Amino acid sequence: MARTRASDYDDKRRAILDRSAELFAAHGYDRASMSRIAEACGVSKANLYHYYRDKDEILFDVIRRHLEELLEAVEAADRPGLPPEPRLRSLSEALLEAYRDADAQHKVQINHLGLLSPERQAEVKASERELVRLFSEAIAGVAPHLAGTALLKPVTMSFFGMVNWHYLWFKPGAGLTRADYADLVTRLIAEGARGIGAERAAQVRAVGG
């Protein structure tokens, strides 16, 4: 007879992932053995193996779950029927809110994704690409002259540069809320993208031809 799972199985897996993410982020993946992970999680090594067969699988699940939760939050907040700038602001606020309490997972994604197998990298990068696609579409909405040009991608990635590294300096309660920062980033991207000008975009389109 197959062994049944405890009712709190998923909760315990999530706790293992959260604590492992903190461990990977603070000390590096290479220094985090299964024994050290078990100790940090307050479980025996044998019990840890009941949930994960090795730390590669833990790393994959940390990154996969993090990206899935980001994507789910952004998709839930997307309102294509909104005017372009409010739509981009809504998406930006949802992404920044999804980053709340996820600094460790975010650091692991940035620093350790390349340690995954090619197959696992391909799976999580699909979620990354979908995030980029959604924001690229929203940015093209506020600056239609960038659609189909070689400038749309660098503008989109500049947006991610602003939000992906905010955890290095952002301090809750220090005068700027996540909603405030979402508004600031939206205005910078929208006004900056519009300021590039249709003439420059047309030049890039011609060069990229």
Image (cartoon, rainbow, N blue to C red):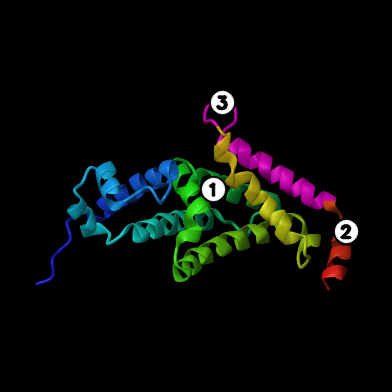
Q: Secondary structure at mark 1?
A: helix
- Farthest-out residue, front: 31
Residue 84 or residue 41, whichever sits in front:
41
Q: Which residue is mark 1?
A: 94
Instruction: Using the rendered image of the protein, determine whether residue 76 is visible from the camera's viewpoint.
Output: yes
- Residue 77: image x %, image y %? 53, 53
- Residue 26: image x %, image y %? 43, 41
Q: Which residue is mark 2?
A: 200
Q: Secondary structure at mark 3?
A: loop
Earlier sequence position, callout 2 versus callout 1? 1
Residues shaded magenta: 171-195
Q: Calculate the distance from the C-alpha at mark 3 to the C-alpha at mark 1.
A: 20 Å
The quarter of the image holding the N terminus is bottom left
Q: Which residue is mark 3?
A: 174
Q: Is residue 42 above or below residue 46?
A: above
Q: Is residue 166 above or below residue 199?
A: above
Q: Main secondary structure of the magenta part?
A: helix
Earlier sequence position, callout 3 versus callout 2? 3
Q: Secondary structure at mark 2?
A: helix
Type of the residue with mark 1: Ala
Type of the residue with mark 2: Arg
Residue 139 appears left or right of 49: right
Residue 140 appears left or right of 64: right
- Residue 195: image x %, image y %? 83, 49
Residue 36 appears left or right of 130: left
10 Å crowding of disc 2: few (<14), some (14-19), many (20+)? some
Q: How many marks?
A: 3
Q: Residue at x 38, y 47 (%)?
A: 31
Residue 57 appears left or right of 208: left
Q: Residue at x 59, y 43 (%)?
A: 165
